[in-house]
Image: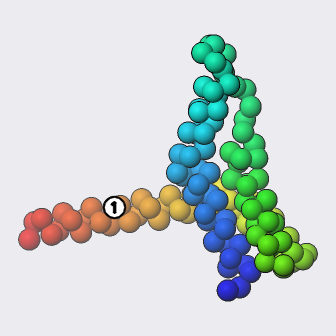
Amino acid sequence: MNIYLELLLVSAVVVYVVDLSGFTQSWKEGLASLLSHGRTNRLCWSGRPFSCSLCMTWWCCLVWALFRGQLNLPVVAASAGFSAFSNTLCNLLIFIRESLTVLISRLNDKCNRA
């Protein structure tokens, strides 16, 4: 498979896990409650780079390219581009999800009327 397609897929997985799945909020809340020991003060750490899809996309793409033995300047530039557009990719994934939800709902309504 082409390294650029692989980096796009890595970016999509990272954006899903960090921004859409709720995993980031869960581990941050769990860590805060673990470290607070019942006190009212909460953890003030933002969680970066692990809670930032831009940061995680950058680092995961670089690690993936290194793992594949294809870490070179064009691949680093592509990794930077994918990380720069991580928010756009997040919005695109949300759009696809919501569009499919509306489409399935309309198809379901038509099937129920027939």
Residue at (60% x, 44% y) in the render: 24
In the rendered image, the quadrant that contains the N terminus is bottom right
Seen from this angle, which residue lies furthest right? 73
SS type, badge 1:
helix
The residue located at (73%, 55%) in the rendering is 56
Amino acid type, residue under disc 1 in the picture: Val
- Which quadrant of the figure contains the C terminus? bottom left
Q: Where is residue 86 in the image (x, y as percent from the top left)?
A: 68, 59
Instruction: Say left or right for 113 vs 63.
Output: left
Percent coordinates x, y for residue 97 in the rendering: 44, 61
- Circle 1 packing at 10 Å, graded few (<14), some (14-19), many (20+), is few
Q: Hey, which residue is sitting farthest top in the picture?
A: 39
Q: Quadrant of residue 30?
A: top right
Asked whether the viewer can see residue 78, the reply is: no
Q: Is 63 placed left or right of 114 in the picture? A: right
Q: In which quarter of the image is residue 47?
A: top right
Is residue 44 depicted above or below 40 in this figure? below
Task: State the residue at coordinates (57%, 57%).
Answer: 16
* Number of marks in picture: 1
Q: Which residue is drawn at 63% across and 36% down?
A: 28
The image shows residue 91, relative to residue 2, as above or below, that is: above
Percent x, y of residue 45: 74, 31
Q: Is residue 92 left or right of residue 48?
A: left
- Looking at the picture, the colour scheme in use is rainbow
The front one of 19 and 59 is: 59
Q: Tell me where residue 39 sits by quadrant.
A: top right
Q: Mark 1 points at which residue?
A: 102
Is residue 110 at least partly visible in the picture? yes
Q: Is residue 51 above or below residue 10?
A: above
